[in-house]
Every structure is written in structure tokens, then in C-alpha cells.
Amino acid sequence: MLLADRHDVISQGIGRKLSAKLVDQGIRTAADLAAADPKILRRRYGVLVERTALELRGIPCAGLEEMVKCRQQVIVSRTFGERISNRDVMRQSLAVFIELATEKLRREGVCCQHISIFMQTSMFDTKGPQYANQASTGLVVPTDDPRVLLATLEPLLTGTWRDGYPFSKAGIMLSDIQPKGLRQGDLFAADHIDPRREALMNVVDAINHSGKLGKVYFAARGHRDLSSMIKRERLSPRYTTNLAELPVVKA
């Protein structure tokens, strides 16, 4: 039977919902699927649809969907040098953590589809108020773009923040980690996979790793950075870089 005689692509293992999306793009038959650009199919609908199209052309794809073992989660957290009682400062701190975590995702070639934030007061402060909470949300499409995750911060913070508590520790956790090349496109969100996003983040990473230009960061973090968060109770004197910390000798 000729591919062009097939009246739909459902019989090729695509599925009814995704087939409807393909039909909207003009891919109505198995012949249409075989003739489609594999790179576009992969970007919009994932590696499984790309493999189906290639196999319809007679190209063996047994090794195309290689299962890549990757970490289950990425966690970035800090115990603060100064306790945080201001919501804006907490949001900026979490934004820094998101930047660090997504940089790790891009470096390892993976994406996440779930984010959690958490915060707590000091468990060693028996006299002060105690509070700990966490919130999480899933993403429609797996991502390694910090802008997507930064957009989730405000609603997550609304569900966890409480005024009047001095928070000593906070962090974020990215989970549902999956290889970037094998991520599956969502039926209604496939058009949101924009190659320009990846190109922009590649430029940001290149600048930040060059060591020649100023650090590029997102406005959501304000002026917060890791050096302003780290607890420094036992910091060694910096004789060689800070004149104020030179030892004083008295005769």
C-alpha cells in the first residue's frame, strides 16, 4: 500500500491528539509525515515523531532514542549570613538560585519540568518563632530557561511566605529532569519552543564564562549574589586583598 493512500497518521503510532496537531500543520497522511522536515518535527513534537517520520522513509532508527541517564534533581540552597525577613529580598535570593540551577541544566544538556521552593527559620533558635514551608508547580513544557522558572516565583512565594519570620535558609529544587534532545512537545504548547530562547541563553552563558565582560544576570535578582548570602562566621582574615584586615602591631 502506498503511503499517500493512508488517510491519516494515527495508524503510524502518533496518537489521536497529536495527529490533530499534525493535521493543522498540513500533515494528514503517512506520506506527508515522511516528507516533513525531521528537525522541525523533533523541535515541535519530540524525538518519537521524528523517528516515526524517518522510519517511514526506510531509515533505521533503532539507536535514535538512546536513553540517557541523568540526575533526578538539581538543588541550590543556602544558609544565609543574615536572616531574611523581607519578601523582596527572599524573592531576589531565590532568583539567584534559579539562575545557578538552570546554568547547571544547560551545561549538562538537560531540562526540568517541575520546580519547588522552600524556606525555613533556624532550628537552633529555640527562643524565636519557628516556621518552614515549601511549594511546587509543574511546567507545561520542559525547560532550561531561567525566565520561564522566574515567572513561577511570585505565585510560589505567595503560597509559602509569612511576614514576621526571620528565615535562615531557603532554596529551590528542579526535578522531572530529562535529556534536552528527548523532551516531548506538548500538543498545545509546541509553538512555545522557540530556538531564539536557546540562542539567547547561549550568548548569556558565553559572556558569563568568558571572564572578560561583566556578569549578565536577570533583573529579578536585584543586587543579590552568593557572596551577600553566605554565612561568614569563621572567615579568615584577608590580609592580601583588604587593607582594613591587616594585623596591627604595637610597639
Image: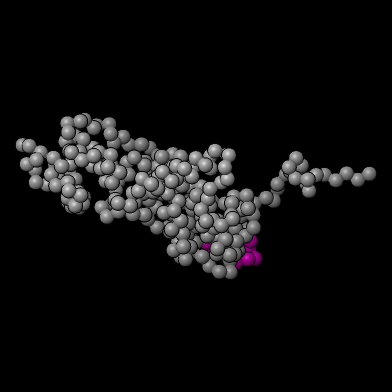
Q: Main secondary structure of the magenta part?
A: loop
Comparing 153 with 6, the one in front is: 6
Q: Residue at x 38, y 37 (%)?
A: 69
Please, is residue 138 above or below residue 236 in the view?
A: below
Comparing 154 with 232, the one in front is: 154
Q: What stretch is highlighted in magenta?
A: 125-132
x, y percent for residue 6: 8, 43
x, y percent for residue 242: 75, 45
Question: Dividing the picture into quarters, in which one does residue 37 lie?
Answer: top left
Question: Dividing the picture into quarters, in which one does residue 4 lie?
Answer: top left
x, y percent for residue 105: 44, 43
Left or right of residue 91, residue 14 in this image: left
Q: Which residue is drawn at 36% across and 36% down?
A: 68
Please, is residue 36 above or below residue 220 in the view?
A: above
Please, is residue 131 above or below residue 241 in the view?
A: below
What is the quadrant of the N terminus in the image?
top left
Considering every residue shown, the one lying at the far bottom of the view is 164
Left or right of residue 36, residue 118 in this image: right
Q: Can residue 171 be seen in this view?
A: no
Left or right of residue 7, residue 82 in this image: right
Please say whether residue 131 is one of the residues in the magenta stretch: yes
Q: Is residue 64 visible?
A: yes
Q: How many labels does the image show?
A: 0
Q: Residue at x 78, y 45 (%)?
A: 243
What is the quadrant of the C terminus in the image?
top right
Please say whether residue 145 is one of the residues in the magenta stretch: no
Q: Residue at x 27, y 55 (%)?
A: 188
Comparing 236 with 123, the one in front is: 236
Left or right of residue 34, residue 139 in this image: right
